[in-house]
Amino acid sequence: AMRWVMSAAKTAVAPEATLELLPGEPTKRTLWEQRKASLGVGSLALPDGRALSYHIDGDLGSGKPVVLLLHGMLSSRLVWLLEDAPDRCTFIAVDRPGYADSSTPCAGYSYTRFARDVEALMDSLGVGEFCVIGHSSGGPYALAVAAVLGPARVRSVACLGGDTEYAHPSPETPLDPVAKDLLRCFASPLRKLWTPVFVPFLLRLGCLFFWLMKRLAGRRTHHLVWTMLSSAERVMWKDRDGDNFFQLSLVESTRSAVLPTPARSGMGGMVTDFRLERSRRFDFDARSIGCKVVLWSGEHDAACLEPTMFNHSTLCPGSELHIVPGLGHLGVLSADVLGALVGRTLEAAGFKQAAKM
């Protein structure tokens, strides 16, 4: 994230996509808004008074498999809005705590607590078994849901460019991407000081950083997201056939993540993600996951390719690994990659017929 903030100050402003439309043809923005309006939006009142916002894309009464979608840092459930509604399954996408329309997490919030929030949501919707997919910082949350709720509820779990346990004691633990951005050539020599010294310092005095992220995400959203894209992904941003739903979902999910809502006004979601990934060991055992674990990452994902490899070798040694050629951290959210991942996740869960539809 730090790399994105620093580059945002010196990168040319992202061009808005332009389309040659036929007379009377609706714009992609119009179609995107229509898709958004078609979602079944809800909010669950949790026992401690917090609100957990979600949407349903599809028909829960259809009997099709259910896939829970967990967005990454500085994002929201809108990142999963594709041009076509899912036909093989039903999506349930949540605003993770502290983002968009979900309440700021309480003090001491944990991955296990989130898993119990998901359990309460699924119980309220009458969903028994389901699959779960998490992107970026949503990856560890997805693993936690699978570990805590067990295979009786979670049929398969997938991480797409997922983060890892940066406080893990293994000498093979990858460097935190934020450490590499901040410390540069000193990151490796000072890595032993990162968790006990630098992370608490940033959490105590990092208000300026989180404020800057909020300002950029809320006011210069196109510009901020553009700086996160690789050259190949910028082509996707401008391409007529794949561009605008990809662009609009990235931009609107980023903007909605930080703009004030009745449920929250600060950056509690981002602060919580930063703390849980870096300040201590995970409060769940990923090795105990009883269902199939699928790990995907973009070939050019500078932030999370190494963490994905570490998740595969150490946290989830029996997992399935796939590297998506030519893409980085955000390009894997394109419709074709997501479609392929959803199919593989359903197949891993035993829903072979749905996976091939």
Image: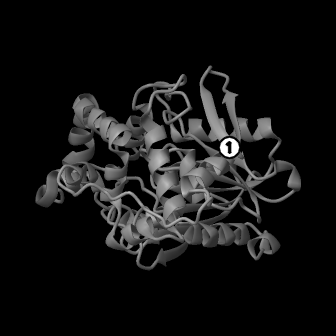
Q: Position of residue 9 (x, y in %)?
A: 19, 49
Indicate left or right for 344 with 225 as reference: right
**Residue farthest toward the top in the current orientation of the protein:** 49
Compare residues 318 and 325 and report the one nearer the observer. 325
Looking at this view, name the residue that lies furthest to the bottom: 325
Q: Position of residue 17 (x, y in %)?
A: 42, 61
Q: Residue furthest front?
A: 23
Left or right of residue 172, residue 326 in this image:
right
Q: Viewer-proximal residue, 248 or 264? A: 248
Task: Name the residue beneath numbered marker 1.
Answer: 37
Q: State the residue at coordinates (61%, 57%).
A: 26
**Against 210, is 226 above or below?**
below
Q: Is residue 296 left or right of residue 40?
A: left
Quarter of the rendering occupied by the C terminus: bottom right
Q: Residues within 10 Å of mark 1 (few under 14, many from 20)?
A: few
Tell me how many marks there are. Answer: 1
Res 72 seen here: yes
Of residues 120 and 32, the one drawn nearer to the viewer in this rendering: 32
Q: How far across and down, in percent of the image, does residue 139 sit?
A: 51, 54
Vertical order, 178 against 335 (above or below): above
The x, y position of residue 231, in whole percent, is: 32, 71
Type of colouring? one colour
Residue at x 51% of width, y 26% of height: 261
Instruction: Identify the secondary structure beneath mark 1.
Output: helix
Q: Quadrant of residue 213?
A: top left
What's the amino acid at mark 1? Ala
Specify whether 45 is left or right of 199. Answer: right
Q: Residue at x 82, y 74 (%)?
A: 353
